[in-house]
Image (cartoon, rainbow, N blue to C red):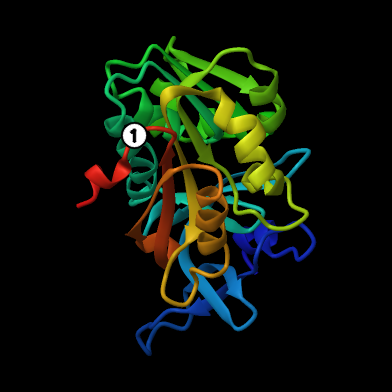
Amino acid sequence: MGELDKVLLNNGNGFSKVHCEPTNQKESNDEQKEDSWFEEELDADLKWSFALNRVLHRGTSEYQDIALLDTKRFGKVLVIDGKMQSAEVDEFIYHESLIHPALLCHSNPKTVFIMGGGEGSAAREALRHKSIDKVVMCDIDQEVVDFCRKHLTANQEAFRNIKLNLVINDAKAELEDRDEKFDIIVGDLADPVEGGPCYQLYTKSFYENILKPKLTDNGVFVTQAGPAGVFTHKEVFSSIYNTIKQVFKYVLAYTAHVPSFADIWGWVIVSKYINLNAFRI
């Protein structure tokens, strides 16, 4: 077994298994070459595998395990606790879908608050808008932020931008304690698994009592809402949409296919006063 497998084949560290399979070789070649694969479990009876070139970096924080893999199909891939977070080839689909609709719905967005988003891609996209004066990115995990700032070269310019205010804190507590309001609030968080660290950031109480009062009058809130495919939308997408619908008058859900996620992905965008139906395509 190669060094790559020794790094990731550990059932106790949150990473899925990496296994090797022989590639086709000429019969005269006595020594077979092995390909390594990263394996992510999507369901009890479904796995998603990626052929690897190598493991680029790996680390462990107080909250989670982190790895940066070089895959043959999707380029550099960020993996946290064994789950794909973003891939170099197509992360733009997720992050552009998360950020740009919300900012384009607002007539003149100046301030953005990002809940989560430690890899820096959401901030990168928000900072493309020239009207923006300040982006607050609040992530609970300092190690993840440091890891991504060092290793995700596409986001290093965003991390250096003077308009970015990086805060290491629980997003719920940070938003609640701030006196200011924001034109745009973004939820770039993990899915709301019951008992998980992000669960409280998807509740009706949070939306109604903490988030909504922190939006300016014409403010816009957008959140990632998990898998939204024909067979997967009931996991979290539908419940997130229905929960938000109880709090905000104008709510719009939208989706896009993200190849590295092996599914359709969903987002929900809301406003207190802007009729988002005018933005339907």
Q: How many marks?
A: 1
Q: Nearer the viewer, residue 269 or 187?
A: 269
Q: Residues within 10 Å of mark 1 (few under 14, many from 20)?
A: some
Residue ID at (60%, 39%) = 207
Q: Nearer the viewer, residue 86 or 97?
A: 97
In the depicted structure, whether residue 114 falls above or below residue 39: above
Q: Is residue 172 visible?
A: yes
Q: Quadrant of residue 116?
A: top right
Most distant residue in the left direction: 281
Residue ID at (23%, 43%) = 278
Q: Nearer the viewer, residue 98 or 25?
A: 98
Q: Nearer the viewer, residue 118 or 36?
A: 118
| Residue 131 x, y percent position in the rendering | 29, 15
Quadrant, the N terminus: bottom right
| Residue 258 x, y percent position in the rendering | 36, 59
- According to the image, label 1 marks what residue? 274
**SS label for mark 1:** loop
Amino acid found under the numbered disc labelled 1: Ile
| Residue 3 x, y percent position in the rendering | 63, 58
| Residue 222 x, y percent position in the rendering | 45, 40
Residue ID at (60%, 27%) = 138
Q: Is residue 73 visible?
A: no
In the depicted structure, whether residue 110 falls above or below residue 44: above
Q: Quadrant of residue 100?
A: top left
Question: In the image, is 246 to the left or to the right of 10?
Answer: left
In the depicted structure, whether residue 1 falls above or below residue 166: below
In the depicted structure, whether residue 138 falls above or below residue 242: above
Residue ID at (33%, 30%) = 103
